[in-house]
Every structure is written in structure tokens, then in C-alpha cells.
Image (cartoon, helix red, strand yellow):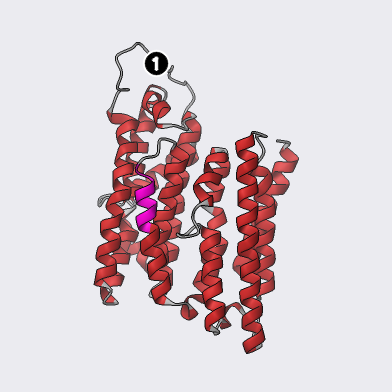
Amino acid sequence: MNPQAKLIFTISLLLGTTITISSNHWIMAWAGLEINTLAILPLISKSHHPRSIEAATKYFLTQAAASTLVLFSSMTNAWHTGQWDITQLSHPASSLILTSAIAMKLGLVPFHFWFPEVLQGSPLSTGLILSTVMKLPPITLLYMTSSSLNPTLLTTLAILSAAIGGWMGLNQTQIRKILAFSSISHLGWMTIIIIYNPKLTLLNFYLYTMMTAAVFLTLNSIKVLKLSTLMTAWTKVPSLNAMLLLTMLSLAGLPPLTGFLPKWLIIQELTKQEMIPAATLISLLSLLSLFFYLRLAYCTTITLPPHTTNHMKQWRTGKSTHVLIAILTTMSVILLPISPMILTII
């Protein structure tokens, strides 16, 4: 892709995100979401492969439908209350429509079907943007309207997302699809706590973004898209592969690593809110996700490919690991001990 075009699309992405997260008026928020959608489409379809074109089409249709619902929700609210302010969403029908729209934007169950397909059809760099930056504006809208949303509906969506995200990821061999289902599962954790403690949702999102960025950039660096190629990639950069194992386990939320922090805090908050059955259920469902993260970790460093025929080992690349990958990977592993400091910041 032409560098100038890429620059324009990247600036448009940042502009759309900034407009949405800083707006008070529904029309401005909607305009930011539209700018975002239109800016990411060329980045999804830049390889001109039929799969990429299909992914871009699916993305456009779902996001256009979600944006229409956002507009419809805000107009219904304005019709009944006379308010266009985002925080004044008081009409029950409007908040229900908005919840559906944001679930569609984020890829929450039952509106999740587009996300794995779109991620599979996109390059890894675009997949990273779709999994992180593109999730920020909808989560911001949820954050701003959290006081008016229906707790039962959000808890149901969250538990279903954690279940389907873990269950559907079990049998995948394509790494981008596994990461898509991982994202759906993490969004479940963010959604369940948004009404009770919105700041925890943002903390979870920031840490998830950091860990996912580390995984995507590492995979992009070693050029891996499938589990079978991941098995032979350990000869390229052994140290990076060893750190990828730890980042995967951190995404799974295992205790000594950074990923345990948001899960621990969310379970603690749910217990305080006397939602012990929901906390128990979502904790058990995270074991499904743990299984496929362990499978990825196993393929990354612990095993040789399971066949006896001679196969070509890949040469070690002499190039050093990018400093951004090093920083993100380190932060994905060691932030748990400074959690008291992180809690004072949020």
C-alpha cells in the first residue's frame, strides 16, 4: 500500500477514535464511529485476496448496522427526553437498542460471528488494530452510559461471551481465529463489571490491549499464522518464543503474571456486589480459554512437531527484536507486583 495512503488512513483512525471518546453529543460520537469504520476498510482489504475483500465486506455491513442502531437509539432517547447528551440516556428502549449496537460493534455474543472471520481475512498488523484500537470507542460509549444500562442483560451477554469465546476457540488451528475468540472471551470479563465498577473495565481493556499487542507484534515478527508453522518457528528467535509463552499464559490470567490482575479485581468486585454465582461461572468458563492458551504455549516452545519425517528447520534470523515488542512483552509479564500502584492511578 502507498505510504501516503496508509498515513491518511492511520490519521483518520486516530481522528475517529478521538472524536468519539471526547464527544458529549450522540451525533459527534456516531460521526467518529463512521470515520473509524471507513478508515479501517482499506487496511483490511489491502492484500486484494478474495478472503480480505470478504472480510472487509462483512466488517462494513456489521459496523454500518451497528452505527444505524446507535443513531436510532439516540434519536429515540432525544424524542422522549429532549436530550442529545450521551450521559443522559434514560429511556429504557433506547438503552436496550444501544446495548445491542455496542455488542455488535465489539463482537459480543450473540453478535460475534463477524469478528473471527474478519480477523482471519486481515493481515496481522490490521488484526492488531481491530482487536485493540477499534474496541476503544464502543467501550468508551459503554463507560459513559453505564449508569443507565440493564445489569441483567449485560451480565447475560458477558457470561455467554466468556462461554462461546472459550468453547469456539478450542478446535481452531488458525492463530488469528484463536486470538479473535480470546478477544470475545476478554470482552465478556469487561462487560460483566462495567455497571458496578467502570474503571475496572478500562483497566482490563488497557492490560488486554498491551498483552494482545505483544502477541500480535511477536507473531508478525516471526511471520506465523498457523499452529503448524508456530511449531517450527522456535528456531528463528528462541528467546522471543520463550517470552511469547509467558505472554500467552498472562493472557490466560495465570497468577504470577500481569493478566491475573484484572481477573482478580473483577472477581473481588463481583463478590462485593453479591454476584457470587456470576463470578463463579465466569471464572469456570475462563478455564476453556486457558486450555487453548496452553495449547498455543505448548506449540510455541515445549514441543517439536509431532512427525518423524525430516523437515526443514528455519534459520535463525540475525536481526534483533524490536524494542517495542521487548517493552510490551516485559510489561505483560511483570506488572502484578506493582498492582497497588496501578490501583492508586485508576
Residue 84 percent coordinates (x, y): 65, 81
In the picture provided, is 245 more to the left or to the right than 21? left
Residue 278: quadrant of the picture: bottom left
Is residue 326 placed above or below 197 in the rendered structure? above
In the picture provided, is 279 more to the left or to the right than 54? left
- The N terminus lies in which quarter of the figure? top right
Which residue lies most toward the top here?
310
From the image, give the main secondary structure of the stretch colored magenta.
helix
- The C terminus lies in which quarter of the figure? bottom left
Q: Is residue 293 on the magenta stretch?
A: no
Residue 133 percent coordinates (x, y): 55, 54
Q: Toward the viewer: 340 or 286?
A: 286
Is residue 46 placed above or below 8 in the rendered structure? above
Residue found 60% across the figure and 37% down from its top: 51
Residue found 65% across the figure and 34% down from its top: 47
Residue 205: quadrant of the picture: bottom left
Residue 249 percent coordinates (x, y): 31, 44
Picture mark count: 1
Residue found 33% across the figure and 49% down from its top: 289
Q: What element carries label 1?
A: loop
| Residue wearing tag 1 | 313
Residue found 49% across the figure and 80% down from its top: 148
Which residue lies most toward the bottom here?
81
Is residue 216 placed above or below 98 in the rendered structure? above
Q: Can residue 339 be seen in this view?
A: yes
Q: Is residue 345 visible?
A: no
Q: Which amino acid does label 1 sit on?
A: Lys
Q: Toward the viewer: 178 or 317?
A: 178
Magenta segment:
162-170
Residue 141 percent coordinates (x, y): 55, 69
